[in-house]
Amino acid sequence: MSGAPPGTVSLQDLSAEQIAQVRSQLEQELKHLTTAFGDLKSAQSKFMACMESLDSVKPANKDKKVLIPLTSSLYVPGRIKDTENVLVDIGTGYFVEKGTKEAKTMYNTKVLSLKSNLATLQSQIEKKQDNFQACGEMLRVKLAQQQQMEAAQGGGAKDD
């Protein structure tokens, strides 16, 4: 194991079956990380949409008619009464009243935090993809070696 960090195993030291297992595990991890990446990206988009919506809550729009969503496809008419405060969903069905500027700052902080998390996750995904490809290449090499050995053994025994 020359040049390998302590606690790691070279793919060359593994059998084809072991490499296939490692590759399968990496594939599962990649699926999980990719799903998490999509979820974080979706949350980031949601928070960015909240920030954009806060831009319409301004004194000039007081008493303006708006549609209030009850579900993703059901709305009721309403009017903007308070342009200085909004209710912010802080999770698990709890809402807190915040000033519009404070709410925008909170959402901006969340967006920046998610941006950092997404960058970290992207880096992890790229490393896993590299490892997955390396396993695939090594598996092909090992299988080709096995076929060559089997052909050599089978070819020497079949001299009729």
Image (spheres, rainbow, N blue to C red):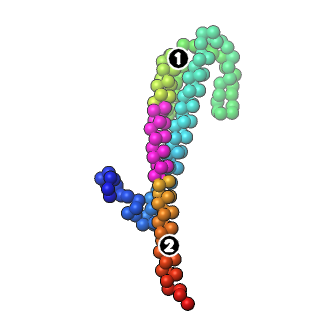
Where residue 151 appears, as percent x and y from the top left, is: 51, 77
Q: Which residues are magenta?
A: 114-132
For residue 80, side relative to residue 113 (left or right):
right
Q: Establish if 60 lies above or below 21.
A: above
Q: Establish if 93 lies above or below 14.
A: above
Between 92 and 10, the one nearer to me in the picture: 10
The residue lying at 65 percent from left, 24 percent from top is: 68
Q: For the N terminus, which image quadrant?
A: bottom left
Instruction: Give SS at disc 2.
Output: helix
Where residue 14 appears, as percent x and y from the top left, is: 40, 64
Disc 2 marks which amino acid? Answer: Gln
Q: Identify the residue position indicated by label 1 in the image.
A: 100
Between 92 and 45, the one nearer to me in the picture: 45
Q: Residue furthest left?
A: 6
Question: Splitting the image into 4 quarters, where does residue 41 fall?
Answer: top right
Mark 1 or mark 2: whose residue is earlier in sequence:
1
Between 97 and 47, the one nearer to me in the picture: 47
Q: Is residue 142 visible?
A: yes
Disc 1 marks which amino acid? Answer: Thr
Where residue 118 appears, as percent x and y from the top left, is: 48, 36
Q: Identify the residue position indicated by label 2 in the image.
A: 148
Question: Splitting the image into 4 quarters, where does residue 113 fall?
Answer: top left
- Chief secondary structure of the magenta span? helix
Between 54 and 68, the one nearer to me in the picture: 54
Residue 126 lies in the magenta stretch: yes
Q: Is residue 97 visible?
A: no
